[in-house]
Image (cartoon, rainbow, N blue to C red):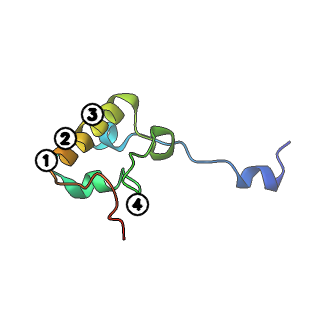
């Protein structure tokens, strides 16, 4: 039997928004890519974002490509 305490920690099923909405991942879409990097500019893992494995690979490639083209910084500016 589930107690109210156990129900509180149940998470919703994560789904891939790219599969659901048929969205394309492009390295030029900086606003979209910014959602999938941390404030320290690291790529967020798929267990946190809920993206499927296929789109996580495409997303990582797009983020790396945007970094090389200087659309997204590699690191945070140090003071």
Instruction: Determine the secondary structure under disc 2.
Output: helix
Numbered disc in front, either 3 or 1: 1
Position above or below: 67 against 54: below
Question: Cβ–Cβ below 8 Å for labels 1 and 2?
Answer: yes
Give the alpha-carbon distance from disc 2 to disc 4, as whole Å: 18 Å
**Location of mark 2 (residue):** 65
Circle nearer the viewer, 2 or 3: 2
Q: Are marks 3 and 1 in contact (CB under 8 Å)?
A: no
Residue at 16% across / 52% down in the picture?
A: 70
In the drawing, what numbered circle is on residue 58? 3
Q: Is residue 76 left or right of residue 24?
A: right
Q: Residues within 10 Å of mark 3 (few under 14, many from 20)?
A: some
Location of mark 1 (residue) = 69
Horizontal relation, residue 60 to residue 11: left or right:
left
Can residue 22 be seen in this snapshot?
Answer: no
Q: Is residue 43 visible?
A: yes
The image quarter containing residue 78 is bottom left
Q: Quick one: 17 or 76, which is closer to the camera?
A: 76
- Residue 72 is situated, as x and y percent measured from the top left of the image, at 23, 54
Q: Residue at x 41, y 57 (%)?
A: 40
Residue lying at the far bottom in this picture: please name it.
79
Residue ID at (29%, 39%) = 59
Q: Earlier in the sequence, mark 2 or mark 3?
A: 3
The residue beneath circle 4 is 39
């Amino acid at each position: 039997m589930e107690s109210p305490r156990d129900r509180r920690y149940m998470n919703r099923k994560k789904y891939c928004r790219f599969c659901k909405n048929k969205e394309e991942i492009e390295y030029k879409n900086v606003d979209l890519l910014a959602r999938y990097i941390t404030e320290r500019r690291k790529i967020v893992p798929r267990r946190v974002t809920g993206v499927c494995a296929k789109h996580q690979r495409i997303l990582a490639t797009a983020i790396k490509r945007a970094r090389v083209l200087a659309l997204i910084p590699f690191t945070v500016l140090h003071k």
